[in-house]
Image (spheres, rainbow, N blue to C red):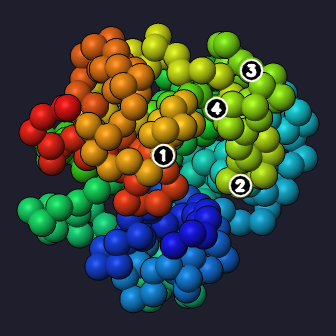
């Protein structure tokens, strides 16, 4: 619709108006953010699990007082880490403990099981190398964000899954501290059209070219059945807005084929612009040119 939408709680499937939106038991929310997003994007179709964790202001304050987290690790300071500590210590309040959340409460794992025959998308957050266990520790988030960790937080066993879609950008970005092989200067990132800002903090994201070795490691950790590559138009401007494989520039098609060959996983979705319709869907195409 030409507008930028930044969500912190509801899944990106909000763009489909008939889709039910559910927040898993392993998730953490801020009540004001959740209610605001429901009002704007998910009225009448949004659900919270009874065991979804709640980040309170005291968690935000505790994190922002922590000089190591803020200055060394580069935390976003949203209280998520402090809330996870409380959860481990069994002190964290859950969605079921707040009256204002009661209209949205549901058994989300049961919902997933009930509707799996009609199609369920389970969406994770952040990126593989921010995983607490498998990422660039200590420059990581406070949970496991690989496919298996996401399933665990949603209450879904591995045998229930038909497809695992691993999403890459056509270049690499990160906010805050930590290694970034091949990192560009801010000026070079701007020149290439890769300059971005974090969705939560608004801080500039650091940028680097696509890294095949990191991608291979992400494949190992997530065992995807298919790969989606977003923002290919940032590498190949002529790809912008294309919706058919044959219409992509030759260089873009060659690049995708090389990624596919290196990773040994089929590339099925190629993002060519900011709108949902700006997508080459190779699942629907029989040939590639």
Q: Which residue is mark 2?
A: 200
Which badge, 2 or 3, comes first in the chain's sequence?
A: 3
At which x and y percent is residue 223? Answer: 27, 26
Front residue of this view, candidates 201 and 281: 281
Estimate the spatial distance between the alpha carbons at disc 3 and disc 4, rounded to whole Å: 10 Å
What x and y, as percent, mark residue 245?
27, 38
SS state under label 2:
loop
Q: Which of the two labelled residues, at mark 3 and mark 4, occupies the earlier sequence position?
A: 4
Quarter holding residue 282? top left
- The answer to whether 147 appears left or right of 196 in the picture is left
Q: CA distance from mark 4 to mark 2?
A: 15 Å
Callout 4 touching callout 1 (CB < 8 Å): no
User: Which residue corresponds to mark 4?
Assistant: 173
In front: mark 2 or mark 3? 3
* Residue 265 seen in this snapshot: yes
Mark 1 vs mark 3, CA separation in Å? 23 Å
For marks 4 and 2, the one nearer the N-term is 4
């Amino acid at each position: 619709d030409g507008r930028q939408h930044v969500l912190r709680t509801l899944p990106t499937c909000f763009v489909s108006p008939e889709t039910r939106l559910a927040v898993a038991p392993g998730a953490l929310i801020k009540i004001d953010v959740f209610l605001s997003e429901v009002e704007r994007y998910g009225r009448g179709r949004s659900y919270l699990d009874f065991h979804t964790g709640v980040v309170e202001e005291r968690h935000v304050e505790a994190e922002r007082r922590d000089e190591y987290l803020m200055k060394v690790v580069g935390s976003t300071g949203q209280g998520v880490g402090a809330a996870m500590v409380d959860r481990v210590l069994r002190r964290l309040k859950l969605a079921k403990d707040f009256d204002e959340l009661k209209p949205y409460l549901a058994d989300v794992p049961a919902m997933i099981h009930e509707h799996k025959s009609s199609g369920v998308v389970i969406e994770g957050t952040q990126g593989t190398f921010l995983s607490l266990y498998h990422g660039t520790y200590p420059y990581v988030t406070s949970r496991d964000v690989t496919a298996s960790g996401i399933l665990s937080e949603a209450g879904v066993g591995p045998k229930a899954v038909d497809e695992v879609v691993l999403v890459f950008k056509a270049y690499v970005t990160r906010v805050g501290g930590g290694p970034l092989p091949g990192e560009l200067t801010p000026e070079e990132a701007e020149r290439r059209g890769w300059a971005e800002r974090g969705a939560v903090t608004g801080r500039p994201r650091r940028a680097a070219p696509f890294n095949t070795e990191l991608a291979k490691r992400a494949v190992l950790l997530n065992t995807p059945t298919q790969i989606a590559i977003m923002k290919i138009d940032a590498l190949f401007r002529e790809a912008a807005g294309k919706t058919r494989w044959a219409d992509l520039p030759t260089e873009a098609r060659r690049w995708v084929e090389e990624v596919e060959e290196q990773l040994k996983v089929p590339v099925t979705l190629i993002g060519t612009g900011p709108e949902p319709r700006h997508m080459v869907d190779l699942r629907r195409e029989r040939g590639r040119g």
